Image (spheres, rainbow, N blue to C red):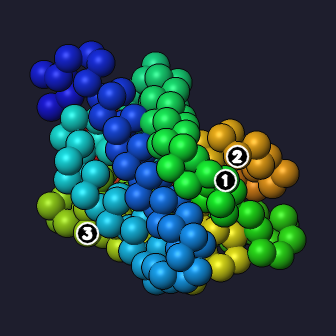
């Protein structure tokens, strides 16, 4: 599918998808703070989950809808995505997140640190939380995106659902980022880097563990190549 798309297409698709995630999700955090709880925790969680779900439907056939540097890494390590594309996907994802955060800052200022993830407790606690949350996310992605036995048409629902689940219970502790790009854009624009390592290493470790765990559960060797969500 991706071979019929112009070379720049998948990278622009990833940038647009991450832009949507940050603009909708972090925008919800900022508006919630500005309106003193007008959206609420549940509304913020739904904003992130819905953004992921609709973008999978919109660009999954173009870029695979990774929307997350950790997901790109997990797929590459398990030979479901070509390594030469990984750096370009990362650049596209970071660019989309940064542009969205920049626009949000222009609209609302630095309220809520532009949606930057900040641990509610210790960095160690949030690191473990981010690792486990991303494990859930990557495990589900591997199931619906790389296993022919799964119902591929339900990928958006399943992945958006696990984002929603993670955000519902993990959000109050770590912010439930699960995504280094989602955390990068707001941190860059607001200048809030104090805890950023948590939101890089936690998702990367969780994604690697989730990807290889599913490979073990599946009980078969993956075939080299690409995959579309």
Can you tell which of label 3 and label 2 is closer to the viewer?
Answer: 2
Q: Callout 2: few (<14), some (14-19), or many (20+) C-alpha neighbours within 10 Å?
A: many
Looking at the image, which is closer to me, 149 or 162? 162
- Res 90 visible: yes
Give the Cα separation between the discs numbered 3 and 2.
32 Å
Q: Residue furthest top?
A: 7
- Asked whether the beta carbons under mark 3 and mark 2 sit within 8 Å of each other, the answer is no
> Which corner quadrant of the image does residue 48 belong to?
bottom left
Q: Position of residue 160 (x, y in %)?
A: 34, 67
Circle 1 is placed at which residue position? 110
Comes first in the chain, label 3 or label 1: 1
Q: Is residue 53 above or below residue 188?
A: below
Q: Position of residue 26 (x, y in %)?
A: 52, 59
Q: Quadrant of the N terminus?
A: top left
Circle 3 is placed at which residue position? 157
Mark linked to residue 190:
2
Locate residue 179 relative to residue 65 in the image: left or right: right
Q: Is residue 9 above or below residue 79?
A: above
* Residue in view at x 64 percent, y 68 percent: 175
Mark linked to residue 39:
none
Comes first in the chain, label 3 or label 2: 3
Locate residue 35 relative to residue 13 in the image: left or right: right
* Residue in view at x 79 percent, y 46 percent: 193
* Residue in view at x 20 percent, y 66 percent: 154
Can you tell which of label 3 and label 1 is closer to the viewer?
Answer: 1
Residue at disc 2, secondary structure: helix
* Residue in view at x 27 percent, y 52 percent: 56
Residue at disc 1, secondary structure: loop
């Amino acid at each position: 599918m991706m071979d019929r798309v112009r070379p720049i297409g998948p990278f622009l698709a990833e940038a647009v998808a991450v832009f949507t995630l940050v603009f909708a999700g972090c925008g919800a955090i900022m508006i919630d703070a500005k309106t003193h709880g007008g959206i609420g925790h549940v509304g913020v969680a739904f904003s992130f989950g819905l953004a992921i779900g609709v973008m999978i439907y919109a660009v999954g056939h173009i870029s695979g809808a990774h929307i997350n540097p950790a997901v790109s890494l997990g797929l590459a390590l398990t030979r479901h995505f070509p390594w030469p594309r990984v750096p370009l996907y990362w650049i596209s994802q970071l660019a989309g997140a940064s542009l969205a955060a920049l626009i949000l800052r222009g609209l609302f200022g630095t309220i809520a640190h532009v949606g930057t993830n900040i641990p509610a407790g210790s960095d160690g606690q949030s690191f473990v939380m981010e690792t486990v949350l991303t494990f859930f996310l990557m495990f589900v992605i591997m199931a619906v995106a790389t296993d022919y036995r799964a119902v591929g048409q339900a990928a958006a629902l399943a992945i958006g659902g696990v984002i929603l689940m993670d955000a519902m219970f993990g959000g109050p502790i770590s912010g439930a980022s699960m995504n280094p790009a989602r955390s990068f854009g707001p941190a860059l624009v607001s200048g809030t880097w104090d805890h950023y390592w948590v939101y890089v290493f936690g998702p990367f470790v969780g994604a690697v563990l989730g990807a290889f765990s599913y490979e073990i559960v599946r009980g078969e060797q993956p075939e080299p190549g690409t995959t579309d969500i």
